Image (tube, grey):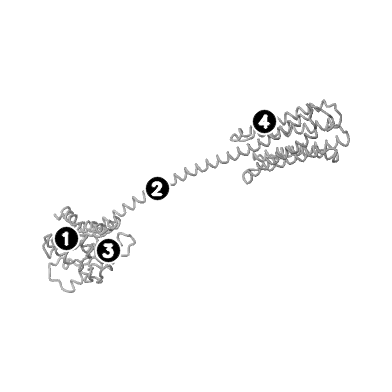
Amino acid sequence: MHIDMWSLLVAGTAMNMVFLGLSAFTWSRARGTVHGPQFWFAGFACFMVGIGLVALRGMIPDWLSIVVANTVILAGVMIKTLGILRFLKIRNALLERLLGAIVAVVALLLVFFYYVDESLSARMIATSIANVLIGAVASYVLLFLSPKAIRIHASLAVVFYGSFTGLYLFRSIYALLWSRGNRWFDSGDPVEPWLLVIVLVILGGIAVGELILLHGAQEQTLRVVSEKLAHRNERLRDEIHRRIQAEKELLAINRELGSTQKEIMITLSEVVEFRSKETALHVARVGEYARILSLAAGRSTEEATLIADAAPMHDIGKIAIPDEILNKPSGLSQDEIGLIRGHTTVGYQLLHKSDRALIKMAATIALEHHEYWDGGGYPEGKRGQDISFAGRVVCLCDVYDALAAARPYKAPWELTRILDYIRTQRGSMFDPELVDAFFTRLHDFIAISETLKDA
């Protein structure tokens, strides 16, 4: 089968334009991530120019279509091999200089054998051996120096670069036996066209192999990134777990501090009640009443708990009142009454400087638990909504328990009398809505009275 050499060279130039486009696509996919594909693109550009110059033989000077064309084609092979080195991040100055030296030496030999010796066989041997050397370097680097992670992706490129090397090794031997004169284009040799066809097929395979190489590198990059993200996620999970544990410990400490703070406040309250010859259970009952009444009035569990925990401190200011006045059965003078009423402001002064929510709430209750809805209370004569919700709640709860318990100046009241009194004070001493809420939960108040009954 006869192959027209000129048609083959034109077709080869066109095919290299296609390879150039595929290489440009590979380069565009790689930009900003890996180096090397720009060298592959430049290599195909050299092939296209070199084969095109050969195809123009007879229309351009022979030194262009012979010396320049072969040098450019050989430079394309060298540039592609440099691209492989860059792609694999191999910086070997000696190897790179060797590749450049091979091209330079062959270019000089081409000049010599064109102008001096005019030996086509010698030119064929020089270019073929140069292609063998450069192809062998590329094959070795791909086969043995590729990272294990992408070695399978490099296998196709290895096959085609190896085939390229083997093909030109065959051509080197074939050139030794060349006997068809010094006019390669017009020699009519039956083997050279087929060698060119195989070279074009190999170049196509190299273009595809380079794209697969890039895919392998990007896949490896994604794998590395994924592993790094997984490691960071693991560290993040550990950090989150550590912080959760720290928060749990902090919450436990805060709960312990809150519990300790509450116990101290209750103990102080019990000390005050003990001085006034009232039982320690009084402050406990007032706290529980306050919880029930706050919930009955529609407040949240958190607010009801805060009020209940702070309520036992309502009379802490009595610590400043002398025992003989605090426990005097009756007949208090105006000055003594004023001193006793001052326990509200004393309690407030003792507590209000704290930033703790519990103690701040206790300060408010201590100040306002004797303020009346109609403004007739003390120490400031506040009325209605100007009195804090907690103050209004503890006012009712404290009066209920005070009436139900024995005090130095009175005997305990019967339940019916207490309830009648609370009804009569609705809108006067007590917040009307709290009185209504009180009667909806009266059974709970009675249950608390029985559970925390004085001995």
Quadrant where the C terminus sits is bottom left
Q: Are marks 4 and 2 in contact (CB under 8 Å)?
A: no
Q: Is residue 258 above or below residue 226?
A: below
Direction from residue 166 to residue 309 in the image, left or right: left
Amino acid at pointer 3: Phe
Q: Nearer the viewer, residue 265 or 366?
A: 366
How many other residues sit within 10 Å of disc 4, few (<14), some (14-19) or many (≥20)?
A: some
Write down the residue under mark 2. 244
Q: Nearer the viewer, mark 1 or mark 2?
A: 2
Q: Residue shown at 14%/67% (left/top)?
A: 328
User: Which mark identifies residue 389?
Assistant: 3
User: Which mark identifies residue 159?
Assistant: 4
**C-alpha span from label 1 to label 3:** 26 Å
Looking at the image, is mark 1 or mark 2 earlier in the sequence? 2
**C-alpha span from label 4 to label 2:** 56 Å
Secondary structure under the numbered disc 1 in the rendered image: loop
**C-alpha span from label 4 to label 3:** 88 Å
